[in-house]
Image (cartoon, rainbow, N blue to C red):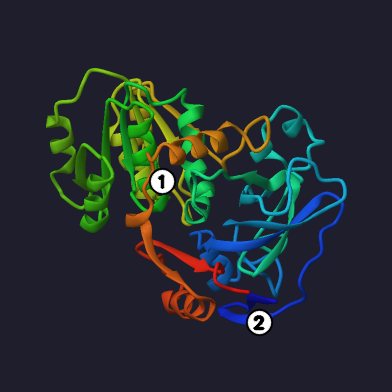
Amino acid sequence: MLSIAVKSNRKLEVTHIAQPKADANSVIVKVHFSGLCGSDLPRIFYEGAHFYPIVLGHEFSGEVVEVGQSVTGFKIGDRIACAPLIPCKQCKQCKEGNYSLCPNYSFVGSRVQGGNAEFVNVPSQCCFKLDDTVTSLEGAFFEPLTVSLHPILMADGCDNKNVVVVGVGTIGLLAVQAAKALGAATVTAIDIDDDKLAKAKLLGADFLFNSSDGDMLAKIKENKLPVTPQLILETAGHPQTVKLCINIADPKATIALIGTLHEDLNMSHQDFGQILRKELKLFGSWMNYSAPYPGKEWDLAKSLFSQGLIKTGDLIDGVYSPNHFVERVTGLQGKSPAGKILLDWSQSS
């Protein structure tokens, strides 16, 4: 079968590998669509892979074509989205339902072969069944959508809150839509890219601010918002955006840190002092799972898509055949694309 493998650092190519067979507790999935995640870029370009060759892809959907003998709840023909975390289910964190915190986890598409292939072996526990109200292309967005839903649920929802999304890439634009759908009083989008902010507006953001504007902080303070709790979602993953969240936060605000930093965060005592003086609540959000596995985030994602409350068209860079996917990703040279790059296996035999 065909796959797209990272053969070595910066070497991505279409290659033939053996088609997998199901074991007792897994299914074989014919992949329909597989998305490039920002976390895949260091695995391709910056020696971040666990091993070579590796078939990446953890944001994917597909159809079950083979079922292991001990598998229940799935049959041939079922369409699924992949919940890529493989928790051990034995440790203290797993037994408490904190699967994202499992110290013994594996992961489809980084620690075992993933969905950038025509077929993939997936543990049945990692298969999330799609119904007819959800397309396979939408199914490839379940994983990133649940990343944005996890901190919202950790913060006890966003109903009647002023939600601020700092960084409106794929996760941020999904967070904008989720917040609106889940009853936010207002949604504010902040980014340095006016094109991304325009997309946020189309997808429901009430207020837009470009953080490169020197007067942005003053404009935010002048903005008349309902008197209601504030929830800030940091999705950009830069030291300056973390500090920006602290600076724009209202007293008693909650800040969810979602973006992964790739450089050190150096904080002045004045910035730290704001956390104290405003009595801010800051928490980290890691992955997207809860009990029962894979969690309420995934059920909520299906509900939002089924109701037509999440749109993906403005989030997509392009949908590519295998060879064109390799060309597009290689051309990034490690930089983030403007939208989601999707690999299309749906036309393969």
Q: Residues within 10 Å of mark 2 (few under 14, many from 20)?
A: some
Q: Nearer the viewer, residue 216 or 204?
A: 204
Q: Secondary structure at mark 1?
A: loop
- Type of amino acid under label 2: Thr
Q: Which mark is residue 15?
A: 2
Rendering coords of residue 102 (x, y %): 71, 40
Rendering coords of residue 250 (x, y %): 28, 25
In the rendered structure, the answer to whether residue 291 lies left or right of residue 67 reads: left
Q: Is residue 101 visible?
A: yes
Rendering coords of residue 106 (x, y %): 73, 52
Q: Nearer the viewer, residue 92 or 23?
A: 23
Q: Look at discs 1 and 2 and give the one toward the viewer.
A: 2
- Residue beneath label 1, please? 235
Quarter of the image where one finds residue 1: bottom right
**Image quarter of the C terminus:** bottom right
Q: Nearer the viewer, residue 167 or 271?
A: 167
In the rendered structure, the answer to whether residue 189 lies left or right of residue 121 reads: left
